[in-house]
């Protein structure tokens, strides 16, 4: 099978999708923004052909490159794959224009536009927060009066917590609306624990599924420096019956949005109002969560995805042997990293349980708290017992300190 893959070299783990496609027998054609000379040796080996364009999110440029590839002698692209949120809609439009199977523009739109997504899911019986999408301030204020505070305001096509604000009263709402240049999604604030449900799905059927938990919820984690936030992939998914409701919701969402053969990333809340859907993307989760799933289940998850794309099936059974998690370690202030306290103790005590880590060397400029879980220092661990892993991650957060000035 000939597979076109969008932007094979950035971010860094994009190369793993290309590797996996090549290893399961696909002939991979890359379309990206970087010069061919900048591709590493692995990509040069795995890619049968590469086309450089100026912007992979530009439908015209991407479409022209795909049509050129379709005209190459002996080349017949049967899939066009994009696994970065910003690339998904352009790829869907080009797919349809060029007659290549895959995620439709309808599905891509519904997975990007939060109010439209929730409208479809409410009609399908999926419990969602009350929401509105609008650029009309009067309409938004009327919604706020009807639903009450707190509310969440974010761009209609936001990914993760990007551009997302909690507002607790009318003054804060008007401040946020004044700073937002485009349409926004405004939602009822749902109190409760936040997690995500991720899959590799084939023809709308869930082939592999995973559940992870945020500690604390994302809005708090991305705005509070002293917190060392975590997310943890559970290995209890098949043992704890309370996950059955999450799995059933995920399947209903995938069906309602028309997601076929794709990775998916769905966020949910559970609290006093029960289980509530938050949002979904028809692409893998960010922050390298797939690496945790691979470590916890003893699989090459990129090959599992590639087998789904190329052969319509997955190759391995998930072991569920380990829970796996990441903890973000924030510098004490913005500036430059000076060093670390208690690092030797952490490595000594957790030897054999650390998957990998990143401790930027002294002198490295810090990144702001809002830059995310892997913007500064981090560690990833695995352990057969979920509760033990959680305690280990908490201990790291209390012990390993990132000094900056």
Image (tube, rainbow, N blue to C red):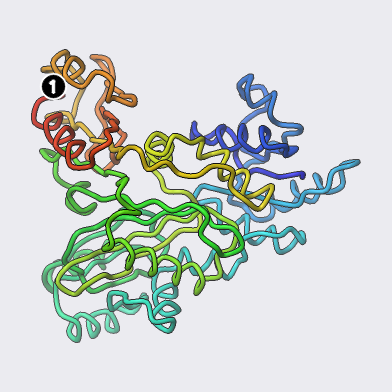
Where does label 1 land, which residue?
403
Based on the displayed image, in which of its 4 quarters is residue 14 positioned?
top right
| Image coords of residue 33 (percent x, y) | 61, 37
Q: Position of residue 377 (x, y in %)?
A: 25, 27
- Considering the image in quadrants, where does the C terminus appear? top left
* Residue drawn at 70 percent across, 24 percent down: 45
Foreground: 13 or 149? 13
Residue 317 appearing in the image = yes
Residue at 26 percent of width and 50 percent of height: 213
Quadrant hosting residue 240: bottom left
Q: Residue at x 42, y 41 (%)?
A: 319
In the rendered view, would you say 240 is above or below 402?
below
Residue 71 place in picture, x, y as percent: 87, 47
- Give the residue furthest to the right: 73
Judged from this view, the residue extending furthest toward the front is: 239
- Quadrant in which the N terminus appears: top right
Residue 86, relative to residue 373: is it above or below?
below
Observer able to see residue 405: no
Q: Which residue is depicted at the point 72% across and 53% down?
A: 63
Q: Nearer the viewer, residue 86 or 190?
A: 190
Element at badge 1? strand
Near mark 1 (Cα within 10 A), the count class, few <14, some 14-19 or many ≥20, is: some
């Amino acid at each position: 099978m000939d597979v076109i893959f969008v932007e094979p070299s950035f971010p860094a783990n994009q190369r793993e999708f290309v590797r996996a496609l090549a290893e399961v027998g696909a002939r991979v054609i890359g379309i990206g923004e970087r010069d061919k000379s900048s591709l590493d040796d692995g990509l040069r080996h795995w890619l049968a052909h590469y086309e450089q364009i100026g912007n992979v999110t530009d439908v015209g440029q991407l479409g022209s490159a795909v049509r050129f590839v379709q005209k190459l002698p002996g080349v017949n692209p049967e899939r066009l794959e994009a696994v970065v949120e910003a690339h998904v809609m352009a790829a869907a439009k080009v797919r349809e224009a060029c007659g290549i199977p895959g995620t439709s523009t309808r599905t891509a739109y519904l997975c990007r536009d939060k109010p439209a997504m929730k409208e479809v899911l409410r009609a399908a019986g999926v419990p969602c927060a009350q929401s509105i999408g609008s650029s009309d301030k009067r309409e938004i204020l009327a919604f706020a009066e009807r639903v009450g505070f707190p509310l969440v305001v974010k761009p209609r096509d936001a990914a993760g917590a990007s551009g997302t604000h909690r507002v607790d009263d009318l003054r804060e709402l008007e401040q946020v609306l004044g700073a937002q240049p485009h349409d926004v999604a405004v939602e009822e604030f749902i109190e409760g624990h936040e997690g995500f449900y991720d899959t590799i799905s084939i023809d709308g059927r869930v082939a592999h599924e995973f559940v992870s938990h945020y500690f604390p919820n994302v809005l708090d984690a991305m705005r509070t420096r002293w917190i060392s936030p975590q997310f943890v992939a559970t290995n209890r998914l098949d043992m704890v019956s309370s996950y059955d409701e999450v799995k059933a919701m995920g399947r209903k969402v995938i069906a309602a949005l028309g997601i076929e053969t794709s990775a998916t990333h769905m966020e949910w809340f559970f609290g006093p109002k029960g289980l509530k859907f938050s949002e979904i993307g028809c692409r893998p989760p960010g922050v390298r969560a797939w690496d945790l799933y691979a470590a916890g289940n003893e699989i090459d998850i990129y090959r599992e995805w590639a087998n789904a794309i190329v052969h319509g099936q997955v190759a391995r059974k998930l072991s569920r042997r380990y829970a796996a998690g990441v903890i973000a370690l924030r510098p004490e202030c913005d500036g430059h990293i000076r060093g670390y306290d208690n690092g030797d103790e952490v490595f000594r005590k957790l030897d054999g349980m650390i998957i990998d880590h990143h401790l930027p060397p002294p002198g490295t400029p810090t990144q702001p708290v809002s830059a995310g879980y892997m913007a500064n220092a981090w560690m990833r661990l695995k352990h057969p017992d979920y509760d033990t892993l959680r305690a280990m991650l908490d201990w790291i957060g209390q012990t390993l300190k990132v000094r900056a000035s």
